[in-house]
Amino acid sequence: MTKIERRAMLKTIGLASFGALSPNLLKGETLREPYSVSEKPITTDILIIGGGTAGTIAAIQAGRAGAKTTLIESGSQLGGTTTTGGVSFPGIFHAWGKQIIGGIGWELVLDSVELNGDKLPDFSKTPERHWKHQVAVNPALYSLLAEEKCTAAAVDVRFYETPTMVEYKEGRWFVESVGKGVKNQISCSQIIDCTGNALITSMAGYDVLREEDTQPGSLVFSMGGYDLKSLDLAKIPKKYHGYLRQNMLESQIRSTGENTSVPYGYVYVKGADSTTAETHTLANQKGRQNLLDLIRDLRGLPGCENIRITNMKTETAVRETYRINGEYKVTKEDYVSGKIFDDSLSYSFYPVDLHRDGKSIYQEFLKPDIVASVPLRALIPKSSRNFLVAGRCVSSDRLANSGLRVQASCMGMGQAAAATAVLAHKNGTTPSDVSVDDIKELLRVHGAIIPGEI
């Protein structure tokens, strides 16, 4: 049989096969109804809004403590700054040779380290630089494990949704939440605002605070295509040296240990603000343009002609927006003196760390054996009922907040807020009326470390 005859035969078989199958395939074609929005009521005990650093831990704690828990997250994954923002070296859980933050946040970090085959720093030693006790995690694993733990705790995680209305009436909160194809009316006993920018606090009508000027955000990225050792830095302007050194590791997956280097850099984004869709969009656009400008500049330098972006986070990580006006405001003096309050529920250990103009950082380190703490009252908006916050929008002045805003501290706040909300729900009361001793006992059961007990 010639090649031409064989081709003709195969073509005939193909057409016959298609003719035999096409009637069945065409039967699958149906007209769809016009786009419609599904509306339904949802009743829950605890509603947590924001699935970032604090919100993820709060949701797991509330679910494990037996409360019916709903978590709303406007994005596509859990973890916030640690995952979407790319600052995936949460800290700090240890101070002065002792662990000061434990519980669910630490459990999640440990599981991420173990599953990634990493190792922990030697926490028994006090490092020369505080960041050497931050624990690098694989952000993808962290996100996966966080979601798995929420599922195991029976948390109803709702991605791609955002609240449009918050109202308190007859002893319950009612929240309207919208997303792609959904519009839900959520009724709950207690709300925890973990948005980071106190969005829900403001929507509920409570006071929020901020300075006119805020810290810059950071768009995290990594790059390759060059050899740092072969570069003649004398021929390269000093303003680029930091970027080049930060990306010197061959692997983009971090390995942990006391001598860990962070294998990525970041570009500052002046005035980065995640408060509204418009300001958040602008922060991301500015960050991406700043990065594009940097890469173009670098590729014009000797030895950097082949530099390329190997990774870029989807969002600019935001350091500072709004804070609540709480029943108590943690001051810088409270923070640096390590004040322990009667209602302190979690610790925080990080220097006062204010990124000012994108070129300098004001830092004030805690003195030996000093560890700051967070009182319950700083998690409760003034004059509120059945309402808590956790995370960087904690009631604090600007300098105290610059230390409180880091991930481990926010995890501790998230667990403390959730334990309080669960007890408030069970007792039919508001968070400020819950026994602090009862909150501490519940936190101990779930592995948290209580201020004053180490």
Image: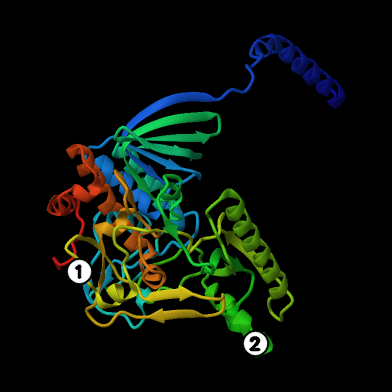
Q: Is residue 438 left or right of residue 154?
A: left
| Residue with the mark numbered 2 | 232
Residue at 41 percent across and 54 percent down: it is 207
Q: CA distance from mark 2 to mark 1?
A: 51 Å
| Residue with the mark numbered 1 | 340
Q: Is residue 333 left or right of residue 209?
A: left
Front tag of 2 and 1: 1
**Judging from the image, what secondary structure is the residue with disc 1 in?**
loop
Q: Position of residue 224 (x, y in %)?
A: 61, 68
Tell me the crowding category of disc 2: few under 14, some 14 to 19, or many 20 or more residues within 10 angstroms, Cα based: few
Q: Quadrant of residue 180?
A: top right
Q: Position of residue 89 (x, y in %)?
A: 41, 64
Total numbered labels: 2
| Residues under numbered marks 2 and 1 in contact, where contact means CB atoms less than 8 Å apart | no
Q: Nearer the viewer, residue 366 or 96?
A: 366
Kind of residue sitting beneath label 2? Asp
Residue at 43 percent across and 53 percent down: it is 198
Q: Mark 2 or 1 closer to N-term?
A: 2
Q: Nearer the viewer, residue 164 or 231?
A: 164
